[in-house]
Amino acid sequence: MDAQHPADDSAPPELPTPDTELTPDSESTPVSESTPVSEEADVEVEREQDAPEPAELDPETRARRDDALRHVRKFGDPVLRATALPVERFDADLKAEIHRMGELMHDALGVGLAATQLGVLHRVLVYKAYVDDPVTALVNPVLEWTSEELETAEEGCLSLPGVHVAVERPAQLRVRGQDEAGKRIEIEAEGLEARVIQHEIDHLNGVLVLDRISRDARKEAMRAMREALAPAEDRPADAA
């Protein structure tokens, strides 16, 4: 894909936002949680640093990864186009939700996950950009500042199996939010960490990476996703 393609400025449609979970629209032909995920399915933003390629995974790790990915809502599910609601209650249920998100992200070999990707309309995200970092949870995140300097890098998404697209984003940012106990926190980030945070905040606003690329690149991404989700025997020879 041409990294210089301009982003598509069209805003994604917003859907009703119930308190917890949306049911997939039967007309949107979503991939259900029980749909097997292709071995070529990508992880959120990119694989955890130094993580093995999917083809190199041992059976136990692959099984955990496939199980984790079954919990993630896929393209076509209307919850991915919904705007998450601010969290007002900081209780044991929220801590359990954040813990579960961190475990699923780890098992999927991802570096970030938003609550909406699990069908929960809370403004909550978790991320771990680098292997030695702890899992960071951001509740009610708000971007306070982004740099004028932009960087283009390839991103994938747990909700878009097989999709790898070059996305231009600010190279640095400052974000404020709350931790799982409700304490105010502020984070300054750059590089991969900044990219992951922006990617996950996009999810909380109902925005996908497909909305940040050109029409031609989007067509290529949709083709790649169809191939990734197709049974092995139905894939083109050059996609095997």
Image (cartoon, rainbow, N blue to C red):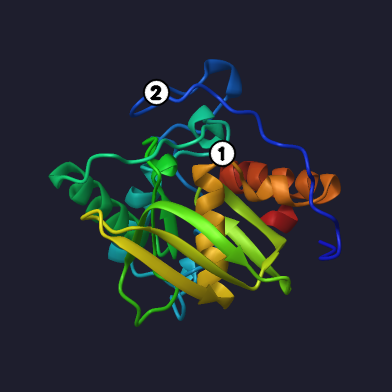
Q: Seen from this angle, which residue lies furthest left?
A: 92
Amino acid type, label 2: Pro
Tell me what residue is drawn at x 60 percent, y 48 percent: 228
Disc 2, SS: loop
For label 1, count other residues whose C-alpha is less than 10 Å away and answer few (under 14), some (14-19) or many (20+). many
Is residue 181 among the parts visible in the rendering?
yes
Q: Mark number for residue 43?
A: none
Left or right of 197, for residue 165: right
Q: Position of residue 38 (x, y in %)?
A: 51, 50
How many numbered marks does the figure carry? 2
The C terminus: image quadrant: bottom right
The residue singled out by tag 2 in the image is 18
Q: Nearer the viewer, residue 226 or 109?
A: 109
Q: Is the residue under label 2 in contact with that under label 1 (CB below 8 Å)? A: no
Distance from Cα at disc 1 to Cα at disc 2: 14 Å
Q: Position of residue 146 (x, y in %)?
A: 62, 66
Tell me what residue is drawn at x 35 percent, y 65 percent: 185
Amino acid type, label 1: Gly
For label 2, count other residues whose C-alpha is less than 10 Å away and answer few (under 14), some (14-19) or many (20+). some
Tell me what residue is drawn at x 51 percent, y 39 percent: 74
The residue singled out by tag 1 in the image is 206
| Figure quadrant of residue 60 | bottom left
Where is 98 relative to 119, above or below?
below
